[in-house]
Every structure is written in C-alpha cells, then in structure tokens.
Image (cartoon, rainbow, N blue to C red):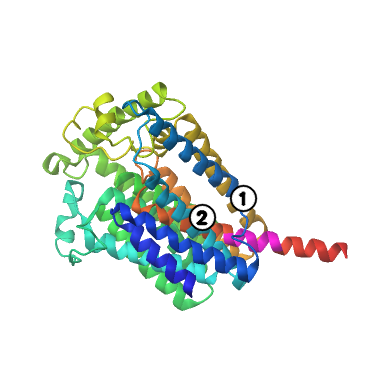
C-alpha cells in the first residue's frame, strides 16, 4: 500500500502550479529501491519504454540547446522542471503495470481508473466554468450544485480542458458498464458515465463531444453483443451527432444566443493559431520553440495571432502542432510512434485476450481514440495537469498486455518441454 500512497501524494503535488512540485519526484527513490530489493527489477519492461526514453532524451537536448543559446533565440526553456509531469506520468503508468504483474490481474487498475473517472465527472458537473457555449442549457446549469473553491478545483475548469479530460474516461466507463462481470460494478460505472456525459454535453466542448462519440461507437460496436441494443446505441450516437451539427449550424435559435457566430469565430481563430504554430515549426524544425513555450510572451511576439495580443494563448489547439512547437519535427514523429505502438498493444490485447481483457482493450482504446480526435482541434499538452489520465489509461493497457504476453510465453515453454 506504500507505493500507491506515495503516487497519490505525488499526483496531488503535480496537480498544483507550484514549481516546487518537481521535488516530489524524490519519492520515486524509495519506490524503486523497494522494488529492486523485492523483485530485482526497477520496472517491468513495456513496448513503450524506448519511445518514452527517446522522448526524455529529446526533452533534455531541447533544454540544453535552449540553455546554451543565452541570447533570446529560439528555442526557449523554463529549465529541467519541464520534465516533472511527463516523468511522473511515465512512472505512474509503469507503477500500474507493476501492480498488475504482481497481482496477476487488472481489477484494481480498473477500479482506480473508474474512481478517477467518477471524480472527473463530478468535478465537471460541479466546477466547470460554463461559457457562452452553454447558454442553450443555462436553465440546467443554473440549477446544478457548485463545488466550493478549494485546492483541487483551483477556481474552476475551462469546459474545453475538463472536456478533454473526460475523453479519456467516458468510453472506459461505458465499456465497464456493458461488460463488467459484477452487476454492481456495471451499475456504478453506468451512473458515473451519465454524470460525465451530462457535463460534457452541457459544456459543449465540440471536439471533446465528437471524440467521445467516436470512442463510444467503438465500444458499442465491439462490446454490445445483442444486435438490437447495439444498433440502438449507434442510433443514439448518430442523433447526438446530428444535434451537435444542428447546434453548430444555428438551427436552435443561434441568432438569439450567438452560438453559431461564436463557433465561426472560434474556428477562424484556430486557423490563425495553426498558422502561427506551423510557422514556428518551419523556422525551427529541429527544436520548435521549446518545451511548452508556445504560450510564452516572447514567442507570441515573434509569431503573433490576431485577437490574442492581450490574452494568454496556452497551446496550439492541435496535439500534433503542439508537439511540433515543443520539439520540432522530431516531436511529431515521436507522437506518431507513441500512438502507433499504443494502438498495436491494444490490438494485441483484443486479438489474444479473454472477454475481460477485451473490455480493457476497448475501454482504453476508446478513451485514447476520443482524446486523439479531441487533439485535432484542441489539446491537453503533455505538460498539463490532466495529462496524467492518458498515462493511467496507457498503463492499464500495458499491464493487461503484459499478462497476455507472459501467459503466451508460459504456454510456449510448456509446449517445448
């Protein structure tokens, strides 16, 4: 129980904007030492190890180049603190793998992701900063209880940010509600799913909604065995898609509430943001602007975006361009490799796993698919406080993959003997 407790403490530290959070990584030392003494390994090897090592190496080179510049030229850097959240996320994923290996099943990993998914859903309902996009549902949002300001909510969540977080967990909750062995677990997951789905629709983060629709379509098509219920679920998702398209198209009184005009303005602004990001990558293909420096005032001055002269522009509103502005073309290639290997792992679980393994493959795959679609026109950068959810989903998939591949190796050894 000591290792999970230490990771919870580190997670709370890395949730805060305080740069001193990086010192929480010191807690990895007793974790790794204990693991070595008990099992003679620091972590269980996974298919993503080399990609993660390459990522950390590229980050280190980027920071060193930026430090040596010293004349204000790109790339820029905030220093080694930038490695904190990614390193925590990777070690969190490897901790999930290690726990699954030691216990021989992924049940606790499922419970943890369910619990965090439920927490995110409740935060989305009670701590979202409802914007003008939600004006059509103002009568509903006005009735919702509000979570008092505290260290966890930090004043509330932008609906796009919390929407991006929901993309990771809603398809997983849906998968558990359909295929979990215990009835109580299915009902609990279903209840949490509907809380989160309600918050997502009320918040109207468009790309998050379309991403979740795609993830849920994958879940429905692969996990609902009864043909009638499968098609009912798909029809429901099609109706939700039609509703969103109609909302964007101004068929629900957009002249009065300004929804259509706002969407048009939002997409126009995104195009300008993407042009700025592409210009950075074209000018600095090897390094980008530096790790999470797209938002820096010096970069904004060099690559301005109309309408954001006096506003903070937190990211490139596209995951691929964000990696490119962070680390250049190498960062984009790294993201491609990261997603490709993750997809291959999920396919292997589906191909060789039993029904519960397939639940994890589809639930995790649906979440990663939903977030990938969200990332086409928005982003939760890898440096963001919610990025740990992606590592947690990935860690659960990697742990289940280890169970399957180790079982296959055992069978092969028995056959040979």
Q: Position of residue 200 (x, y in %)?
A: 30, 55
Q: Which residue is mark 1?
A: 47
Q: Nearer the viewer, residue 133 or 346?
A: 346
Name the residue: 69% across, 59% down. Answer: 405
Farthest residue, direction right: 417
Name the residue: 27% across, 43% down. Answer: 246
Q: Secondary structure at mark 1?
A: loop
Q: Position of residue 239 (x, y in %)?
A: 35, 51
Image label count? 2
Q: Is residue 404 magenta?
A: yes
Q: Position of residue 59 (x, y in %)?
A: 46, 40
Name the residue: 58% across, 53% down. Answer: 346
Q: Quadrant of residue 303?
A: top left
- The magenta-colored residue range is 399-406
- The secondary structure that most of the magenta stretch takes on is helix
Farthest residue, direction left: 256
| Residue 360 visible within the image | yes
Q: Which residue is mark 2?
A: 394
| Residue 213 visible within the image | no
Q: Residues within 10 Å of mark 1 (few under 14, many from 20)?
A: some
Image height of 1 relative to 124, above or below: below
Farthest residue, direction top: 283
Q: Position of residue 278 (x, y in %)?
A: 38, 26
Q: Earlier in the sequence, mark 1 or mark 2?
A: 1
């Amino acid at each position: 129980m000591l290792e999970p407790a230490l990771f919870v403490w580190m997670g709370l530290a890395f949730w805060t904007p305080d740069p001193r959070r990086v010192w929480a990584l010191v807690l990895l030392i007793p974790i790794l030492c204990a693991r070595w003494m008990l099992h003679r390994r620091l972590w269980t090897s996974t298919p993503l190890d080399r990609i993660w090592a390459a990522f950390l190496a590229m980050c280190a080179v980027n920071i060193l180049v930026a430090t040596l510049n010293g004349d204000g030229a790109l790339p820029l850097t905030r220093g080694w603190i930038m490695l904190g959240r990614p390193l925590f996320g990777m070690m969190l994923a490897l901790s999930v793998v290690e726990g699954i290996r030691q216990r021989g099943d992924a049940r606790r990993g499922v419970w943890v992701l369910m619990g965090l998914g439920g927490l995110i859903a409740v935060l989305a309902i009670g701590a979202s900063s409802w914007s003008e996009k939600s004006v059509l549902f103002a009568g509903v949002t006005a009735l919702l209880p509000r979570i008092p300001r505290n260290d966890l909510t930090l004043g509330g969540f932008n609906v796009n940010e919390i929407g991006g977080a929901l993309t990771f967990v809603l398809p997983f909750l849906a998968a558990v509600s359909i295929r979990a062995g215990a009835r109580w677990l299915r009902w609990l997951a279903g209840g949490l799913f509907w809380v989160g789905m309600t918050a997502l629709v009320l918040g109207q983060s468009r790309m998050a909604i379309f991403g979740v629709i795609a993830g849920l379509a994958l879940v429905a098509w692969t996990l609902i065995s009864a043909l009638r219920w499968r098609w009912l679920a798909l029809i429901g998702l099609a109706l939700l898609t039609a509703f969103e398209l109609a909302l964007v198209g101004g068929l629900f009184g957009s002249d009065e509430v300004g929804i259509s005009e706002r969407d048009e303005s939002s997409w126009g602004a995104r195009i300008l943001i993407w042009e700025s990001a592409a210009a950075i990558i074209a000018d600095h293909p090897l390094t980008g602007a530096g790790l999470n420096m797209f938002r820096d005032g010096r970069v904004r001055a060099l690559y301005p975006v109309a309408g954001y002269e006096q506003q903070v522009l937190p990211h490139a509103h596209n995951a691929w361009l964000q990696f490119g502005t962070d680390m250049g073309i190498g960062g984009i290639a790294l993201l491609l490799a990261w997603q490709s290997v993750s997809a291959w792992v999920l396919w292997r679980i589906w191909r060789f796993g039993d029904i519960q393994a397939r639940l994890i493959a589809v639930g995790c795959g649906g979440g990663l698919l939903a977030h990938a679609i969200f990332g086409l026109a928005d982003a939760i950068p890898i440096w963001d406080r919610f990025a740990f959810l992606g590592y947690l989903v990935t860690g659960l998939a990697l742990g289940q993959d280890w169970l399957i591949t180790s079982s296959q190796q055992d069978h092969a050894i028995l056959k040979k003997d």
